[in-house]
Image: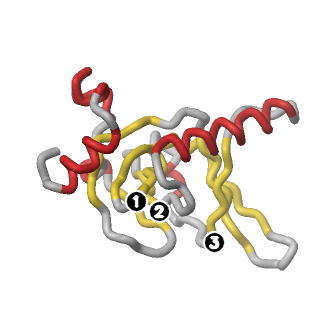
């Protein structure tokens, strides 16, 4: 059974910021002759690797709300030049927009059960996807989404 991760998207002020970052990384990878994946490095290595790689995603919290996810393709343990072991989260190139879900700040990452993850925005109908991001955020803050 799949398991997800959730993490704050530090430095991104909007969903478009995340998309731009992912696109930039994909173009850099392609120009280097690699697959268009993005990699996010984190200090802690997940213990539930098999569950995460069984269809799991990394859900991104942007400005206090879960806004998007990227499929998890691989988890790689690496040792930095400082001798500290880290984990590279290899993420798919697609950023899937989700229904906004308020989330308080936290450090690092957390596991996210499938039944607690917000649904993909596309599964909620065309009207929801056509709504501006700011309006969706505000409705989610009010508890109406």
Residue at the far top in the pictured view: 126
**Nearer to us: label 1 or label 3:** 1
Q: Secondary structure at mark 2?
A: strand
> As displayed, is residue 116 above or below residue 20?
below
Q: Quadrant of residue 106?
A: bottom left
Q: Nearer the viewer, residue 139 or 48?
A: 139
Left or right placement of residue 32 versus residue 106 in this view:
right
What residue is rendered at 71% in x and 36% in y? 26
User: Residue 49, can we see it?
Assistant: yes
Residue under numbered circle 1: 63
First in sequence: mark 1 or mark 3?
3
Scheme of colours in the image:
secondary structure
Q: Nearer the viewer, residue 85 or 142?
A: 142
Q: Secondary structure at mark 3?
A: loop
Residue count near mark 1 (Cα–Cα under 10 Å), binned few <14, some 14–19, many ≥20: many
Residue under numbered circle 3: 43
| Contact flag, marks 1 and 2 (Cβ < 8 Å) | no
Q: Secondary structure at mark 1?
A: loop
Q: Position of residue 30 (x, y in %)?
A: 79, 30
Residue under numbered circle 2: 8
Q: Nearer the viewer, residue 77 or 57?
A: 57
What residue is rendered at 12% in x and 47% in y? 144
The tag on residue 129 is none
Q: Position of residue 45 (x, y in %)?
A: 60, 67
| Contact flag, marks 3 and 2 (Cβ < 8 Å) | no
Question: Distance from label 1 to label 3 (Cα)?
Answer: 22 Å
Left or right placement of residue 7 versus residue 132 in this view:
right
Question: Distance from label 3 to label 2 (Cα)?
Answer: 14 Å
Instruction: Report the quarter where the C terminus lies.
Output: top left
> As displayed, is residue 111 above or below residue 83?
above
């Amino acid at each position: 059974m799949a398991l997800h991760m959730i993490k704050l998207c530090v430095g991104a002020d909007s969903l478009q910021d995340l998309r731009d970052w992912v696109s930039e990384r994909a173009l850099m990878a392609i120009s280097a002759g690699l697959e268009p994946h993005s990699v996010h490095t984190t200090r802690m290595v997940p213990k539930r690797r098999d569950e995460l790689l069984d269809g799991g995603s990394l859900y991104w919290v942007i400005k206090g709300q879960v806004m998007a996810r990227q499929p998890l393709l691989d988890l790689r343990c690496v040792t930095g030049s400082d001798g500290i072991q880290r984990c590279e989260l290899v993420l798919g190139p697609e950023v899937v927009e989700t229904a906004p879900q308020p989330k308080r700040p936290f450090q690092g990452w957390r596991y996210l059960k499938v039944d607690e993850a917000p649904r993909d925005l596309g599964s909620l109908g065309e009207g929801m996807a056509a709504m501006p991001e700011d309006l969706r955020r505000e409705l989610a803050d009010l508890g109406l989404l």
